[in-house]
Amino acid sequence: MLLFFLAAILVKKYRLFFFLFSILFYLLSTYYIGNKLITPLEKPYNIPLEETKVDGVVILGGGHYKGSSNLPLAESAFKRLMYGIMIAKKRNLPIIYAGAGNELESAQLCIDELNDSLDLNLTANKDKLLSSFSIVYTHDALNTQQNAEKTAKIFYEHNITKPKIYLVTSATHMRRAKALFQEYNMKVVPAATDFKSRSDSCYCFYYPTINGLYINNIVIHETLGRIRDILKSLIH
């Protein structure tokens, strides 16, 4: 930000460009702007969980740190996992963990650690979806759409053609994820977690920080993902 501002002072030809870019970079690195942009994504799902009869709890993965000696799931993924377990444990529901690649191994390691330390009694089934508190894992998926496709396949193989699910994912990701799962004939009850927005205020919101960049990056990522999904639906 300072380099762009310095360039705006020293360079004559592109002074306005560098000045505007330094302002834009400052705005995108503040939590104030990030909070303003991310709140509309999260607000519709920042509500108590709807109590209803469902066929299972679907937890979307959210990254991992391969090689970690314990709890290798990334922060967002771990919050999703814990909230999904809380929902399923309380209501005695089966869990489908929809992740990608090596993240499934990390999720299984986390489940094993939680089972050992908290006595969850969460049994893992390779392919069979039970009607009680248990967990199955989808096969490798590269994105949320493939997670939805593979989840629908699991239900279909158990003769559940129109499943109703609690969908657990980050609040910022819920709108896009819900739409994709509905495309595969699933009725989705949002179970959002991992909220990033705040209802309070602080002078520190106006400081340029890495956290500010991170929040704004999430907004940009979800916006571009939504545009991509819309374009794909129009093409097909």
Image (tube, rainbow, N blue to C red):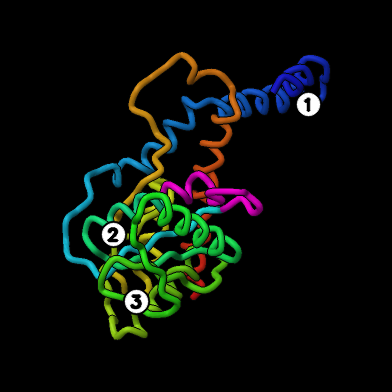
Whole-number angstrom distance, CA of label 2 to CA of label 3: 13 Å
Which residue is rendered at x = 40% and y = 56% of the image? 115
| Dominant secondary structure of the residues highlighted in magenta in the image | loop
Closer to the camera, 162 or 19? 162
Range covered by the magenta-colored residues: 64-79
> Which one is closest to the eye, mark 1 or mark 2?
2
Which residue is rendered at x = 36% and y = 60% of the image? 178
Residue 153, compared with residue 9, is above or below; it is: below
Residue behind mark 1: 14
Whole-number angstrom distance, CA of label 1 to CA of label 2: 58 Å
Residue behind mark 2: 88
- The kind of residue on which mark 1 rests is Tyr
Residue 122 screen position, x and y as percent: 36, 63
Judge the density around disc 2: few (<14), some (14-19), many (≥20) Cα neighbours within 10 Å: many
Q: Do the residues labelled 3 and 1 touch (CB within 8 Å)?
A: no
Residue 34 screen position, x and y as percent: 48, 32
Residue behind mark 3: 129
- Mark with earlier residue (1, 2): 1
Residue 31 screen position, x and y as percent: 49, 27
Q: Note whether residue 164 is visible.
A: yes
Q: Note whether residue 226 is visible.
A: no
Residue 89 screen position, x and y as percent: 27, 57
Whole-number angstrom distance, CA of label 3 to CA of label 1: 61 Å
